[in-house]
Amino acid sequence: MIKLTITTSMEISDEEKAKIEKVFAKKYNEEIYPVYLIDDAIIGGIIVFDGEKVYDGSIRNQLTRLNNSLSE
Amino acid sequence: MENKLLNITQDITKKLESFDFKNHTISTAGRIISCNDGVLTIEGLADVKNGELLYISGDHYALALNLEENAVGAILLTNNPSLSAGDIVYATGRIVGVPVGNMLLGRVINPLGEAIDGGAEIKSSRYRNIEAAAPPIFDRAKVATPLYTGIKAIDCMVPIGKGQRELIIGDRQTGKTALAIDTIINQRDKNVICVYVAIGQKASGIAKIVSALKEHDAMSYTVVVSSMANNPAPLQYIAPYTGTAIAEEFMYQGKDVLIVYDDLSKHAVAYRTISLLLRRPSGREAFPGDIFYIHSKLLERSAKLSESLGGGSLTALPIIETLAGDISAYIPTNVISITDGQIYLESELFHSGIRPAVNVGLSVSRVGGSAQCAAMRKVSGKIRLDLAHYREMLLFSQFGADLDKSTKAILNKGERLTESLKQEQYCPVSMADTVIEMEVMVNDLLSDMPTKEIKSFMDAFISHIHRRHNEIIKNINRTQTLSSEDEETIKGSLNRYKERYYHERIGTKA
């Protein structure tokens, strides 16, 4: 059983939640215990934390990476 | 102008188009389980390395020091962050490193390499890990070139060579920092880069030192790494390693570097704080078991490199503060056994007016004569003996008994030698001037002059030599010896100058 912390910028529908859980259940081959957080500071997209790795697909992170690559 | 703007917009558009937005970052992270007294216990972070820098959102950093099976113990490097249990900690993948290079000269930075002097941000293309291996044996050369401190007592009797570690040890307020700062000021125009590491000092003290260095034109070749008393203990702990990494960069470029650690006693206390908070077992005086190792690995990085590696050198002047003159306490004995000698400053000497308060009997330089020029070596042996005899006879003179002629002569000479070794702060004396002055004193040529007047007389005489007999100075600097002809010239000039001096004094009195 793996605890997943899923952060989105706004409420997502039950279908979308089910989709996410299915993908990660397949990846880890284990049951998922999901925790959903809302944080509008990430602007958009999704961040998933499984206790060991952070999968950062937020718009905030994309903008940060863009900023870093432009200032090189 | 329009073309330039057009180019810039094209550049940006190109970069935007080629940017891969879908390349989402996957970072190793953990979650804070507990956070107390600046120590974080983190679950997760399975692949983190020892000494790795960890990032917490909000620009906070921590240092991973305790790697256990199910948790990681890390210490915070920033003050007062508002963290809660459950916050995410990211691994940066890199060991703590600092920017290095010439852009650091003249700057004051904190141990993480950030500027704290209000100037421009530190940007560098080169970074160095603060922890690095010391140069192996076959990469080193013998310490043979002198590093002049500009302080007569030290350059004469406790000489320091480039690549040596010389400990400055003494009670509080005995002039330890003043000695180090004078040495830094003396390196102007000598092609030596200086790094001053302040560990746990008052901010006002550091400001005073920086302004003194600026006033004497020393900041242009000095880097100040400062971790003040209000910085968290981990920051104070890494400060000397930061300074050493910066200095090593210059050393491996073939340059000569001087580094001052002020002071390692506070460094030991900071490391004790960290170890106790990380619940590591404590030993003598509550210090952890590796308290010797943190200083030995630091000081071993000072070396004189062989010619094949550029011939650079890193000379270290660690400072240790003793309590009530006890140099046999735990940390002082540790560092004494690591360094190549010590300069022992005594508060009794300081309060009786002998400044710099160097106890010549207890101070030693294990490199000694091989890092001294021939001129200095000639006079230093005699002076040390004379001062040793003087100290012996001083006890007898306190009895008020009648003394025979030879004892009186020894006391006379010793008194005058001690007087001439006194020196003002921020007044470094060049090697040639020291040689001439010591030559005069060791041959007891001023035995008829009252002790009080010796200093002002010698100052005037040295300037006289510079004006009238400048070739002697040039000869000494060129050949690094004092020829017998130059000796005779000095003696003759001294006699004539003495007559004139008394004549003028009698003249003004009348």
Image: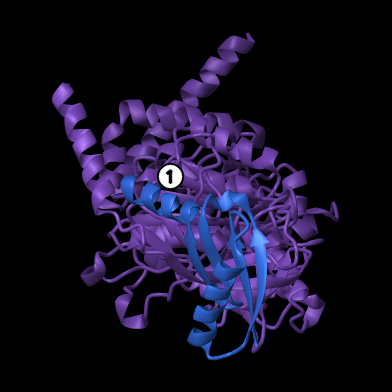
Chain colours: A blue, B purple
Badge 1 marks a residue whose secondary structure is loop
Query: What is the chain identity of the residue bearing mark 1?
Result: B
Q: Is residue B203 visible?
A: yes
Work out whether A12 lies above or below B462.
below
Q: Name the residue under label 1.
A: B122
Work out whether B315 lies above or below B347.
below
Q: Closer to the camera, B179 or B378?
A: B179
Residue placed at 69% from the left, 69% from the top? Answer: B271
Quarter residue B294 falls in: bottom right
Q: Residues within 10 Å of mark 1 (few under 14, many from 20)?
A: some
Q: Closer to the camera, A28 or B118?
A: A28
Quarter residue B485 falls in: top left
Q: Position of residue B195 (x, y in %)?
A: 47, 51
Q: Is residue B340 visible?
A: no
- The residue most toward the top is B510
- Identified by mark 1, the residue type is Ile
Q: How many marks?
A: 1
Q: Where is residue B354 in the image (x, y as percent from the top left)?
A: 68, 45
